[in-house]
């Protein structure tokens, strides 16, 4: 519960320091901040993943269209660990990169990554925390890397 208080105080501090409220002003302030704290950084690093666990990562993207209008979108990707954690992470990275390229080539003039993190909570809780920093953030998609990259896909 205390992490919500910390997030709220940081949000108020950011709003006080940057009165214009623009997203661009807050990007540098919170660039490497984890939105949802599910324990200490040391505990996160030491967490042991085993076969059958689901690994979820997300990227927060700033999308600019041809009219220079900016939007904040969040893309999630998940993979079940079958062989190793690193193999699942490689699948997730590939899917996130593929989605960024797709967004850039089809819909938007420019795609910038604002943040990328492992998600250790539910997507709903994570989005609530993200919306404290980026009030207009929307979910672009939740990608299942295992489904897209299945070897025996029809």
Image (cartoon, rainbow, N blue to C red):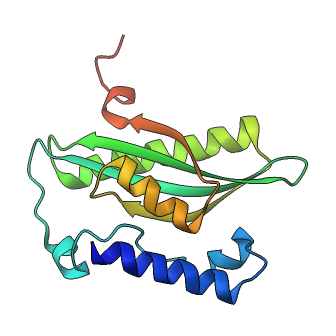
Q: Quadrant of the C terminus?
A: top left
Q: How many marks?
A: 0
Give percent across and percent down for residue 129. 44, 62
Answer yes or no: is residue 29 visible: no
Residue 45 vertical position relative to residue 62 in the rendered view, above or below: below
Give percent across and percent down for residue 47. 14, 67
Q: Quadrant of the N terminus?
A: bottom left
Give percent across and percent down for residue 111. 69, 54
Question: Which residue is found at the position 8% from the left and 51% from the top?
Answer: 50
The residue sitting at the top extreme is 154
Would residue 25 appear left or right of 29 to someone viewing this image? right
Answer yes or no: is residue 88 visible: yes
The residue sitting at the right extreme is 67
Would residue 129 appear left or right of 25 to someone viewing this image? left
Residue 17 vertical position relative to residue 94 in the rendered view, above or below: below
Question: Which residue is found at the position 30% from the left and 49% from the top?
Answer: 122
Question: Which residue is found at the position 91% from the left and 49% from the top?
Answer: 67
Would residue 109 appear left or right of 33 to someone viewing this image? right
- Most foreground residue, 89 or 35: 35
Give percent across and percent down for residue 2. 29, 78
Residue 113 vertical position relative to residue 90 in the rendered view, above or below: below
Would residue 105 appear left or right of 83 to someone viewing this image? right
- Most foreground residue, 152 or 13: 13
Residue 147 vertical position relative to residue 48 in the rendered view, above or below: above
Question: Which residue is found at the position 36% from the left and 36% from the top?
Answer: 145
């Amino acid at each position: 519960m205390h992490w919500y208080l910390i997030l709220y105080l940081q949000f108020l501090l950011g709003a006080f320091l940057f009165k214009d409220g623009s997203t661009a002003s807050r990007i540098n302030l919170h660039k490497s901040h984890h939105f949802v704290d599910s324990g200490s950084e040391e505990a996160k690093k030491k967490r042991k993943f085993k076969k059958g666990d689901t690994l979820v990562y997300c990227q927060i993207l700033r999308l600019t269209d041809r009219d220079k209008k900016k939007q904040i979108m969040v893309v999630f990707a998940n993979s079940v660990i079958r062989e190793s954690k690193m193999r699942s992470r490689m699948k997730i990275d590939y899917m996130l990169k593929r989605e960024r390229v797709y967004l850039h080539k089809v819909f938007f003039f420019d795609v910038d990554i604002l943040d990328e993190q492992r998600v250790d909570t539910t997507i709903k809780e994570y989005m609530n925390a993200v919306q404290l920093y980026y009030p207009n953030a929307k979910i672009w998609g939740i990608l299942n890397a295992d489904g897209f990259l299945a070897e025996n896909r029809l």
